[in-house]
Amino acid sequence: MGRITFFLMLALIIIPVGCTQQEIKEGQVYVVSNENNSDEQLGDKLNIEGRIPFQKYVNESLMAEQIPNQILLTFSPDGKEMYLMERIETESFPKVIKGEPGEKVRIIIEDITTKNQKIIVENIPFVNRVLWNTEGNMVAFGGGERLTVYDVKSKNTVMEEKLAQDTINYFFWSPISDSKLYSEKPDLTNGTIYYIDSQKKVEAYETREETYYKGKLDSNYYYGTKWDLANGDINTVILDKQGKIIKVLTPGRFRDAYQKSLLIVGERGFGLYYIRDINKSEELIALTQDYVYDVKFVADGKIVYTTGAEDIENNLFYLHMVSNQGSQLKKFKVSGSSIAVLPDGNSGYISGPQWEPVDFVQNKLGKDSLEKAEETDNLPAIYAAIRGAMSTLSSHELNGEKNWNRLKKYFINSSLPEQWAYFDVEAIFQEKTARLSAGNNSTYIMRIVINNYSINHTGDAVSAGIRVYTKTPNGRGITNDYALELIKKDGNWYVTGFSTFPYSPDQGELQEIVRETVAKLQTGTIFSGELENKQILIGQIQFWRSGIPHLAPSVESADSVKVFLQVKNQGKQEIYKLVLEKENQNSWKPVKLTRKELSSL
């Protein structure tokens, strides 16, 4: 985007400071008609116009040369500095391949007069929320469940280590304490409270505050979320600076406000609701029941929000543009889930590999359509296979879906060594029911992170360690680590093994132990001679953790092994499951032999 060297003015009033600088304030439509209203006078109807939370630009002709990969986030309240976000190019792991993209950025301060720049923080996620405290001496940047606070006076970030340890997906400054900051977590609407000056944090269970400030209505009133400790309900409310609740609006988490309009998401992020007028809060407009990654008001009170795209092979999202009447204007497929709105509210950028520009006035993307990156190697196809395979598995695990077409598309058995991912998932389909219920609409979100990755010298086999996180509308979810083996066949990539570790020395050692065990089976010396004199071929050897039980993400974490045996019995081939448990470092003991429950340990 362009380097912006022009100045700012108030929506209604210009306050000059010297000859070239001026104080920055949000444009406010202002205020309560009678600031001395009592609670009885307010009643159910609040005579409030609310505020327009955008800064106005002037002197646009002073825009200087273009600087690639920089986004304007905010101006300092004194009008002397601007804060920019710049992409950090990296190919390091871990790498997000499904879910909210994990690109890293740095934040830069630029002096508007001298053009001098200074990096204040880097290697943080894409920033989609910026908020100054009431004094204007601290600014908080949030995005990717990470919060960063910068102290203008000391010219340093504060509480950086403590904030980096917490997952924070929303925040708001206290209206009466410049160093007090309320936070929200993915699974806790009213989360940790941070006291910046004293470098302390207080958890929700440690405070008596049931209502947290979440947004500003006007100079006297605020939005908050009240957590009813008796029944666990969360309601968005209007309260004053002293914390007194003036009006209860609706269940759900506050997300943004524009004049008298309000945006609310469901308690766990699924569902988005629009209230056009807080005096008619019962007139709730449901915009979506999907999981909402990001949502904001933009110019003229329009709404933009992102949801996941119906495309299991690609990590794409939908950007929805909605009128201030609540009707959808446009819907675009984009590469990212977070929205950075420029200070004037007229334009912004979408996170992701491309940082796509958006014009909120004309309701269009900077590009006509999402451009597909040229595939210079196997990675895009490998990522697509992993996404498709894990989506197939998770849809069954959460909803009981048995998609046989996807089973054939993303899984395959292979030999040398024996790896039976197709057989594994087929057995899961036949034997298991859904672990969790995702709700009536059978929706869930998924995040896949690749922790490590290696490809063989011929370029047709891959080992990958991944973490898969899923979440449902009822708040339950599953987080599991997987060790995958993939192979390329006829130009397509398939998952061929779960926790098989074919290139590990332990796999070779287990091969020998299993051969010795099979010899004992054939001589009838173990398991009551069940397979005595039978023809037995050793199939897949798979590493497990018995305590959970679950597939082992590494050889070192495994304490059990499941082996599939191909047994010829009266002219028919049958599959048996042999389980061995680790007794010590070099000793494995056979403990189970069965033809039942092949999908489990």
Image: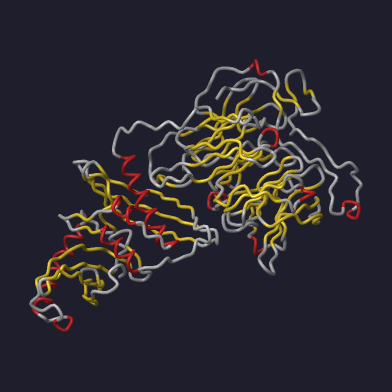
Q: Is residue 513 left or right of residue 289?
A: left
Residue 8 lies, in percent from the top left, at: 71, 25
Residue 32 lies, in percent from the top left, at: 86, 42
Give the residue furthest to the bottom. Answer: 528
Task: Say which quarter of the image contains residue 490.
Answer: top left
Residue 436 lies, in percent from the top left, at: 47, 65
Quarter of the picture holding the N terminus: top right
Q: How is the image coloured?
A: secondary structure
Q: Nearer the viewer, residue 405 or 59?
A: 405
- Name the residue at 79% across, 23% down: 16
- 549 in relation to 19, above or below: below
Q: Is residue 299 left or right of residue 560?
A: right
Q: Nearer the viewer, residue 6 or 305?
A: 305
Residue 340 lies, in percent from the top left, at: 58, 36
Q: Is residue 375 left or right of residue 478?
A: left
Q: Is residue 84 left or right of residue 520?
A: right
Quarter of the picture holding the C terminus: bottom left
